[in-house]
Amino acid sequence: MTNPRRFLLRMVLFLMAVAGVGAILFEPLHGAFMANAPLNGLILGVLALGIIYNFRQVLMLYPEVTWIENFRKNGPIASSRTPRLLSSMATMLGERNRDHLSLSTLSMRSLLDGIYSRLDESRDLSRYTIGLLIFLGLLGTFWGLLGTVASIGDVIANLSVGADASTVFSDLKAGLEAPMAGMGTAFSSSLFGLAGSLVLGFLDLQAGQALNRFYTDLEEWLSSLTRLSSGALSGGEGDQSVPAYVQALLEQTAESLESLQRTLTRGEESRISSNNALLNMSEKMGTLSDHMRTEQALMMKLAESQLEMKPILARLAESSVSGSGGMDEATRSHIRNLDVYMARLVEELGSGREDTIQQLRSEIKLLARTIAASKDS
């Protein structure tokens, strides 16, 4: 959205230029103002009110632009202040998601028509103040001319031809002061009225450009959110529009399809995550089976070693019973150590087998939960 700051800058620079010209021409303007101070003061008061109102017209666009920017970036914000010009659009779009927002051509046109009527209505007072300044200037002009005509009539009626020439000229000079005052009223009020209408005209022009730029940017944004109908349901009478209930049914169907698409997308994401979990589970199961094969091979080697040692132990036992070739203390110590090592190895194999079984059970439970969750989704 275009920031209305540049239009405010133009208005401020124009007022500064007008103030500079007024400062240069202060003396003649002061004399013209004092020709009829009440009427000229009224004209300047209307001018000040018009200037304030035109600035207000531009300043009120800031919250509207801020609301649109927040909606485009963050979606509907419940805590934000409802805009004044876009209140109908805020009500319509307040519950929608900005990522899935779409409007029909009829909805967009109704929104834009309502906003345009509000923007045009807000400029009525500014136009009225311009016409009021012109009216006050003309009113002062006719007021001064009426006073001038009446004063000239009185001067002519009071002239005495038979009197002294110096007396006649002094009376004429004194009598012409009232017509000159009337002419001053006429020209000063016209001057201030037309100058004020010129100032307000330029400010109204800048305010109108700011409002038109805001309306154009809003129309471009809403056009990007509008979906066009294919015209398949239009009647056979040229450009006849679709009935309202059919249009509403189509919009509801489109929203239902969008909701179904979002549901399918979430289901697809859940299925992909379940597949990834199953792949990880299969990899862990493969690793676990490798460990089990390794332990099985170790147990087979241990059994073979026990089979090989069995004849040796039998011969040792026979020799111990027969008394021939008895074992010394070192041999008995080796045999006892061998028994201890064998018992420790058997315990370690048992504990390793139990740990392997527990890991296998936990992995199977996790696999069952993953499969059940994938079925529920």
Image: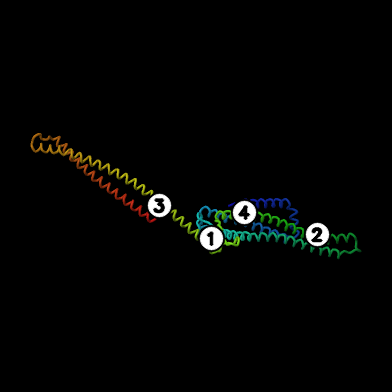
Mark 4, secondary structure of its residue: helix
Q: Is residue 210 left or right of residue 246?
A: right
Quadrant in the rendering for residue 123: bottom right
Disc 1 crowd, CA 10 A, few/some/many (<14, 14-19, 20+): few
| Spatial CA span between label 2 and label 3 | 96 Å
Q: Is residue 224 above or below residue 149?
A: above
Q: Which mark's residue is nearer the viewer, 3 or 4?
A: 3
Check if mark 2's residue and mark 4's residue have beta carbons within 8 Å.
no
Mark 3, secondary structure of its residue: helix
Residue topped by disc 2: 180
Viewer-proximal residue, 147 or 370? 370
Q: Earlier in the sequence, mark 2 or mark 3?
A: 2
Residue type at mark 2? Met
Q: Earlier in the sequence, mark 1 or mark 2?
A: 1
Residue topped by disc 1: 92
Q: Earlier in the sequence, mark 3 or mark 4?
A: 4
Check if mark 1's residue and mark 2's residue have beta carbons within 8 Å.
no
Residue type at mark 3? Arg
| Spatial CA span between label 2 and label 4 | 49 Å
Q: Earlier in the sequence, mark 4 or mark 1?
A: 1
The percent position of residue 312, horizontal first and vertical second, equals 15, 37
| Spatial CA span between label 3 and label 4 | 49 Å
Residue type at mark 1? Met
| Badge count | 4
Residue 213's disc is 4
Q: Which mark's residue is nearer the viewer, 2 or 4?
A: 4
Residue topped by disc 3: 271
Residue at image position (16%, 39%) is: 310
Residue at image position (27%, 48%) is: 357
Residue at image position (36%, 49%) is: 278
Check if mark 3's residue and mark 4's residue have beta carbons within 8 Å.
no
The percent position of residue 134, horizontal first and vertical second, equals 72, 60
